[in-house]
Image: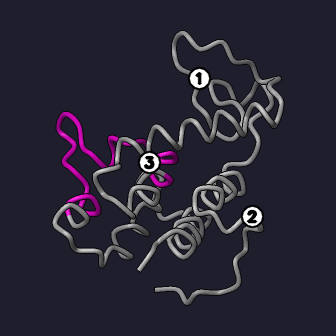
Amino acid sequence: MPSRAENPVKASPDRFSLAVECVKRFEGWHGEKKHWPYVGWGHKVLPGERFTNSISKAQGDSILREDLRKLCRMFSYLGRDSLLAAVLSYNVGPYRLKGYGKRPKSRLLKKLESGDRNIYKEYVSFRCYKGKVVPSIERRRKVEFMLLFEE
């Protein structure tokens, strides 16, 4: 498990704001047509939404905060771990954690639901793309865990 180093995200001490800044840092700005259907700080435009790639950074921030709030509500039964689950699911999708169809519920969620909070290995395991470890995603998971996991 990483040691608690200096906070690389400069934000208020509020954990939710810290999570927002962390997502912004790793998602980057999606402001060009080549990023469609993603806009702002990684929001996937859903059917019926009328966003364009030309939204302002303030609008992008507002959308990101609303998306994270929705995900926090989805995982609210996890208590203090709801924000960590929300940040992970913002990137990988909530059903990678919750399971759907033939995809089973993640080991991470099973451990949290059983009260086992020794989840570092399971959290960082969400670091692959097409079956291969991606170093930048692994770094992201380690930073998210270090900043947002409450002992």
Q: Measured along the vertical axis of the image, is residue 151 above or below residue 71? A: below
Query: What secondary structure is marked by label 2?
Result: loop
Question: Which numbered circle lies on residue 45?
Answer: 1
Foreground residue among 83 and 52: 83
When the figure is inspected, residue 117 is found, relative to residue 91, above or below; the finding is below
Q: Position of residue 73 (x, y in %)?
A: 39, 42
Label 1 amino acid? Val
| Residue drawn at the location 28% of the way across and 52% of the way down | 77
Magenta stretch, main secondary structure class: helix
The numbered dot on residue 11 is 2
Task: Tell me which label, 2 or 3, sits earlier in the chain.
Answer: 2
* Residue 32 locus on image (x, y percent): 80, 29
Secondary structure under tag 3 reads helix
Residue at the disc numbered 3: 89
Q: In the displayed image of the protein, which residue is found farthest to the bottom? A: 3
Q: Is residue 110 left or right of residue 134?
A: left
Indicate the amino acid at tag 2: Ala
